Image: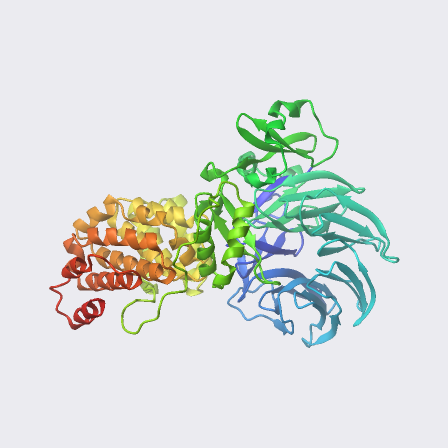
Amino acid sequence: MYKLSSTLYGHDDDVKALSNLGEDTIISGSRDSTVRIWNRLDKENTKDFSSSIINLKTEGFVNSLAIYNYQSELLIVSGGNDNMVHLTSPNSVFTDSEEYCFIGHTANICTLDTYENLVLSGSWDCTAKVWNKETGAVLYDLRGHENSVWGARFLNENEYLTCGADRTVRKWSKDKQVKCFIAHDDVVRDLLLLPSGDFVTCSNDTTIKIWDGVTFDLKATLVGHQSFIYSIGLTSTGDIVSCGEDRSIRIWRNYQCIQVIVLPCISVWKVMVLPNDDIVTASSDRLIRIFTNNARRYAKENEVLAFRKQLEESSISESVLANVNKQALPPLESLDTDLPTIEGETRMVKSGFDILIYQWSVGKWLKIGQVVNGASSNQKQLYNGKYYDYLFNIDVEDGQPPLKLPVNISDNPYEVADKFLATNDLPQSYQQQIVEFILQNTEGMNMDTKPTDLRYGSTPKSEGLIPQTQYLAFEKMDIPKLISAFNKLNGKQSEGNILSGFETLINCEDYTELHHLALEIIKRWDQDSKLLGFDILRCIITKIQPSEELFPIIRSGLEMENPKVQMMAVRILVNTFKCKGWGEQVMLDEDILSIIFTEGLFDNLANKIALLPTTIATLILNYSVLTNKYQLINFHKKLLIIISKLLKYPAILDNDESSYRLLAAIGTLDHMKSIENKAEYLLAFANKDEERFSILRNEIS
């Protein structure tokens, strides 16, 4: 029986691809644009792997991997939505030059395979290509699929199998198609070759099929998955392993499912079997998990319990009950007597007012989740540091990865739609479609809510200083000063909390690992030293993707008694506005305002803490830019209330730079919607006689 062996942390987005250099080295590719290498710490006696080494950084998602091993040359082959095939040495790091790069595809590369000195790639551009590694030239351009080519495998040097979104499997001899048939009722996602010469396919139609390798006759259909099946693998004993959108790994023997393992994530994107028969998974929660049937490599009890707790607390939308009579569901106790006959069978039962989901796995019931309606934060979906009742994947363009749409039941669906469109630079014409999707796929939202009169993107253009349209940031990175501070403070820590590698990471511009190191400083170092961790985050926040820990850590900084830490935490949020792809989405959360502007913050203003006035004024200015850009009425009201309070503090008005930035914020808000008592606000700056103040006052007036 397979059980958890190890969990590998390091990627900052979905892990999409896996490969290996034997049982002791795992290769992974992710939407965080990196290829990483993980090495087993002790090849004889341990299940544990080292922290990852970044082998390659690309300009896009990494979605496919393979290993090139021919005539003593060993290379990692990777592909993704930069449309290129990259070949790198496993001994190199991302700062080194790659060995080879093949250019020819015009869309995402989603599958790779190798044979001797050849590389085979499949793409969303509807083609597969056979490359000569030595020349980088395309030997054969396999054209015939009517949609994306999701799987491609070498049969031998001159023959290949491909499968794709057009539901077909095709056999090729060099560049000639010699066989084509419809294999499934939906997209065919992966191909697996069996030692017997037969082959296996999996599909979005939730089935796995085994085919005769000569006649292409169907030999068996494996049924059990409840959603899309993304990937299949094979153990040394001939068991088939599969994974997919139903969060599960399934192990099949003699056409029957013998074990189901459910993961606490949304999607299991990839499954791989190591030479020692351990199963490796890549999933949407950024993690790599390893499962083993060897008791020597089982995870420690506390790791297993933590995994089980994550699984039990995972939530499933109440929309799954659309056609289920909730009142007729059996009680929890019924599981003791009503036993299933099929591995992986799922049951919903009632326990008090809760609806629980159990699955039959290896002779016993396991709780795999709870149906929720947004009841508590630990049952919600976490996205960009905030919990939501729902987190949808929205496909807006064929051949492109889905966009995340977070929704809370209490939200106005029109405002949610507008924020989504604005964040992703989508046209306003999509609004009604998004609203209808939200209403159809949630329960409890207000269907009578009407759209507001104002629309994102409707801000009239103006010349001059008002409105401000660019976000300001505190991005200066004094590297020698940071290194000196790290070395000095690191030496003061207790033995177990001493950290290493900072100078290398900062010189190599490895911002992902710097992000993790900064979090470790904040979590592990003494109170007087934590400021450095927040300062590092300030420097790199615009260069990273947010981790689940990031925003709880920032909030802890806002709540600390150390005023310098509080100021630095605010500066991180100031810089967050400039984070491409996610910054505005985060700062559109109105709750953040109340988290920032506490009495503790105003007390520090009263005590005239250095740099705090300019920091707060810049934050308000950035909020005014955001508010004007997306015409946010609620933010307009709240910001004016905060500004009125700030103007009572001499620390703000005695500082010319904070005064100027706050005045610019007032002007930007007035540009969006006229401020009724504007003259009172301007009066606070009447004694500022610098020319820049006069110009700004005149423009606002």
In the picture, which quadrant includes the C terminus?
bottom left
Measuring 72% from the left and 52% from the top, which residue is drawn there? 203
Q: Residue furthest left?
A: 687
Where does residue 14 sit, x and y in percent of width and height? 55, 54
Residue 5 visible in the current orientation? yes
Is 477 in front, or is 689?
A: 689
Q: Which residue does the image show at 35% across and 51% down from the upper left?
A: 490
Quarter holding the N terminus?
A: top right
Q: Residue at x 16, y 57 (%)?
A: 680
Q: How is the image coloured?
A: rainbow
Q: Nearer the viewer, residue 435 or 646?
A: 435
Q: In the displayed structure, does residue 543 sit left or right of residue 267?
A: left
Is residue 100 depicted above or below 645 in this figure? below
Above/below status of 498 relative to 692: above
Seen from the viewer's position, the closer of residues 483 and 648 is 648
Residue 570 locus on image (x, y percent): 31, 53
Relative to 572, 647 lies left or right: left
Residue 51 as seen in the image, left or right of residue 230: left
Residue 340: image quadrant is top right
